[in-house]
Amino acid sequence: MASVSIVDLLSSSADFTLLVRVLQRTGLIPVLNMARNVTFFAPSDEVLKKLPTDFDVPTLLQYLIITDPIVSYNMTEEEAVYFSYLRAPAAPDVPLPLRVQRLQSSHQETADDAGMQLVIGSGAAKVVRHDWVADNGIIQVVDAMVPLPGTLCEAVAGPANKGDMRLFSQLFVKHPMICFLLQYAQDTATLLVPVDSAFDVLNDVELSYLMVNAGHDDRLRFLGSHFLYSSVYRQNDTLGLGTNVPSMSGAIVNIKKSERGIKFNGQVDAIESDVVFQNGVIHTLPSFLTPWSFFEFSPRKYLYGLNATRFTDELLFHKYDHVLDDTNRVQTIFAPVDAEGGDMPVSEKTLEYHFTDGLIDSLDVSMILPSRLSLPSLRGRHQHILVTIDENGEFWVDGKSKVLRAPLLIGNTAIIPIDRALDLPPSLHYAAGSIYEARTTLQIFESLGLFDDDVVKGSTIFFPDDSAWEKLGSAAKFILSSSEVVKELLCSLMLTEPVYSSDFNSANSSDYETAAGTRVSIKTNDSKTSIEFNMGNVETVASLGSIDILFDGGVVHTISSIPIPESINITPRQLLDAEHITSFVELLESASLAKDVIADDSQYIILAPANSVLTVSNITSATVDLAIQLGLHILSRRSTPGGSFLSGLSVYDTLVSGVHVSILSELSDNMYKLRIVKHPLIESIQPIRVLSSGVSTSGAEIYVIDRVLPMSVLNAIADPPWWQAHGVLVGLGASGGILAMVLIGLFWFLIIYRGSKNWRHSQALGGNDKSFVRFRRSFSESGRSIIINANGSDEEDEDDDAIGEDTPFLGRAASGRLGSRVNIEDFGDVDEDAEEVELPSRSNEHSSV
């Protein structure tokens, strides 16, 4: 029986007439006739007719002649790699591989019903008639021509950057030498390609490091660990025991056949295996063959990954390798990233300013951190780094460098990327120039030469803002009038060592030495919004404004109140002099009140009319009842609790007996409603404007006001009681009582008239006509107080140092007008040690009633 060859079978079918003609023209008929046990994947004439005219049909037909017989029902594997008669252009000594995959259809019942699909590289052809057996081989009819596969480099490093191989491809293209070596060797290789999701084990900075030039060596090691010399296919492990193949990096990779395809190193199963190319094969992996520790990431590598290349190069130039490569060192690095045209610090000291010991693993609040930079201007102490947060929630370093992302941790090192290099803090003169709210203090520092580097070297300066000087009022005018006093004050607010907000303690006070040679205790609240100064016996609480304003020699904090040290004594007279209140002081002296009212230790509240006000009001030393007039303006403290006089929380006694004053309300800025009360039913409401104010060291309060308080309330008669308005019957019922009172009043008038007549008689006989006002001075732990009274006696006291319990006080005369002749009213207990002083009250021509 004659044998039937592959060509015979093709010639017997009208579907392959064109194919046979092409085989004849290309000289492939003898090849097929001489072949034994081959497989020919034969395209039908319909397939050939659809090919483009430039298609290399002869070459493709050689590619479809396989050196092994492939029978569908004999395929024990779902896929296998076979070799064709065609030699690969990229590896002339190696036959071109072709991958055959057997697919089972859902309705298949036997192996003969199997459909077959050829998969070569990125192309595919399906077998439409299978297992056509000839004596010298098998014909499998396909529905498409299969293009030749490309090379490994074309697949991985090509411009398309294939799908899930994109990241691996980006690394691969940075090493064109690999492709050159493959081409030069004309040999095959195996690439184990992790898909993109495998790179999730790396954060963006680590991946970025592998992409930049600085990551060259680690990148090449990584690629080499996934590059195997020679082609390795699944079927190479014929016994299922595994095959050990050396990688380009020198490591041994174990390849073992598994149910799912191929397992590498006993752990990683290939996603897709045996993707063939002219000079090799690719297996895609779900993860790296190397562990994360393979890369040995360090602060140096993270800095390069963050694109802080210039900064890192400067550090290496200055021999900071040990800092950048030690992952166990606890530190935080503020890393400026590269910018177009951006300048990098070049000095070693500037570089050290970007480091702080300690791990800052998160940014939640503002903070002040010591850098590694120590400076002579700080007396060898470390300069600090200020991290603040703005209203948009963005963080800034030293107010100029923006934080670009949250801290990155590598070992015990945190790296905080910033958009520009840090500048060292400037001089105090320059740094303080930005404190717009403290212009007054800036001018004082300038005029006194306190900006000198030797003065502020290694110091902390509490800068009073403008509101602090305004709060001092008249005291500020006194202080600023003397360069010695203001310098002493500011030096008491200057500590001889840098104290940052991080050093503030809310639990306990901390003692510091000042530039004035004194000691001060400082304590803050928990939120560090206020600070308490204790200078000996003087305690002051001030709000903290701008804190941690860094300069080359220390730090500045602004405060809203000024603590006055014990060494500076501000008296009431000095406050009045600072406001040029001369007329009121002269009147106090004329009335012999100045010695007590404006004494150094006085604690009175003084409402001092301005000079012009007294001039317009025509109040002079000759004014009738001058002491009473002045007494209305002198207030003493009483037990009623409250704040300052203007707070309106307290009622104050005046020096005029029985007369009290208080602030009812604030009408507008510095304008207040003052209430003067003599009796619950007798009061006067006066608007006053406070022109200026101040508090002495002893606690006396001085208020310069725009008017003289009137004495009309002292002469006023109480308004009728409410019941007088309730009908005629009540009036008639009271008429009898009124008539009786008139008779009684007439009786007393006669008695008084008789007494007055006797008094005039005594005057005619040479009685003393000198009248005077007496004021009682009593002392207690709370301070000095004065009560102004009028003497009703017609004789002088023989001993002015003794006052009896019946000492008269200044009040209303029986006639209803003010005078020095008054009835004696009980004033309560009198201090046995009280001192009585004579003061002229008015001229003799007004001394009688």
Image (tube, grey):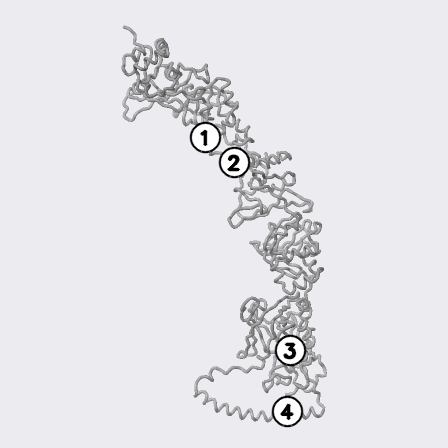
Q: Are there few (<14), some (14-19), or many (20+) residues within 10 Å of tag 3?
A: few
Q: Are there few (<14), some (14-19), or many (20+) residues within 10 Å of tag 4?
A: few
Q: Tell me residue 341's x, y (percent).
A: 58, 38
Q: Are marks 1 and 4 in contact (CB under 8 Å)?
A: no
Which residue is tagged 2? 205
Which residue is tagged 4? 756
Q: Secondary structure at mark 4?
A: helix
Q: Tell me residue 311's x, y (percent).
A: 59, 37
Q: For the C terminus, give its image quadrant.
A: bottom right
Q: Secondary structure at mark 1?
A: helix
Q: Which mark is residue 166?
A: 1
Q: For the N terminus, give its image quadrant.
A: top left
Q: Tell me residue 646's x, y (percent).
A: 57, 68
The residue closer to the viewer here, 745 or 575, is 575
Alpha-carbon distance for marks 1 and 2? Answer: 18 Å
The answer to whether residue 412 of the structure is visible from this angle is no
Amino acid, disc 3: Asn
Amino acid, disc 4: Ser
